[in-house]
Amino acid sequence: MMSDEYLEMCNDLTNLISNEENISGNSVFEILKKYSSNISVFDMMTFSSQVIEENKYVQENYREDSQKSYIESFLYRVKDIPKDTSDYSKNIDKQSLDGAITTLKVNHTEDTTKNKNLLIFYIASVYATFLLEEPIHPVGTPFPGSLKVEQENGKFYCPVRDANIDTPNAVCNICLAEQLEF
């Protein structure tokens, strides 16, 4: 049985978009809190194991930083949500959120696992993009070629954004970072 909680979360967000004229960040945050509370220590261990497995193909000199980045970008953010006491009363752009949810639903067709990895990815991605208003991979995240996610004049730039737009399960196309020109 595949874990479809990420689809349920997407549906909850879609219902919010359909039923509310203005969407406050707090409404989105409540949905993220609900689903992040369903992430167990076992789910976190499974996620970490997958990150380590997938990073075994990354150049050795970037492997450790890459693993650390994924765990910080996704797992730590999901763990932080229940403790976050911020007020996200600012309205969320409905069209952007709707586009993000559509992307996440399309991505799910690539998943055949029984774990909650996509739920972790999607919670952290929506949280970073729409509530924290920061890139999914934090500033300073290293990529091969000695390139990093950067911030300049209030804008975020990622060296691999455009290269991963069409990658299945990639969340680059909902990230607010722009392509870093190099």
Image (spheres, helix red, strand yellow):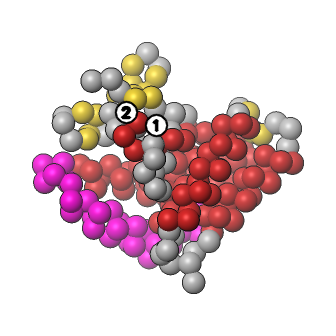
- Magenta region, main secondary structure: helix
Does residue 26 appear left or right of residue 63 in this picture?
right
- In the image, 157 versus 123, the foreground residue is 157
Residue holding disc 2? 158
Do tag 1 and tag 2 residues touch (Cβ < 8 Å)?
A: yes
Is residue 18 rendered magenta in the image? no
Give the residue drawn at x 27%, y 67%.
Answer: 53
Can you give x and y, in whole percent of width and height, for residue 155 in the image? 46, 22
**SS class of the residue under badge 2?**
strand
Residue holding disc 1? 135
**Camera-nearest label, 1 or 2:** 2
Is residue 56 rendered magenta in the image? yes
Q: What stretch is highlighted in magenta?
A: 36-64
Does residue 22 appear left or right of residue 166 in this picture?
right
Give the residue drawn at x 40%, y 67%.
Answer: 47
Can you give x and y, in whole percent of width and height, for residue 25 in the image? 70, 40
Quadrant of image for the C terminus: top left
Q: What residue type is labelled 1?
A: Pro
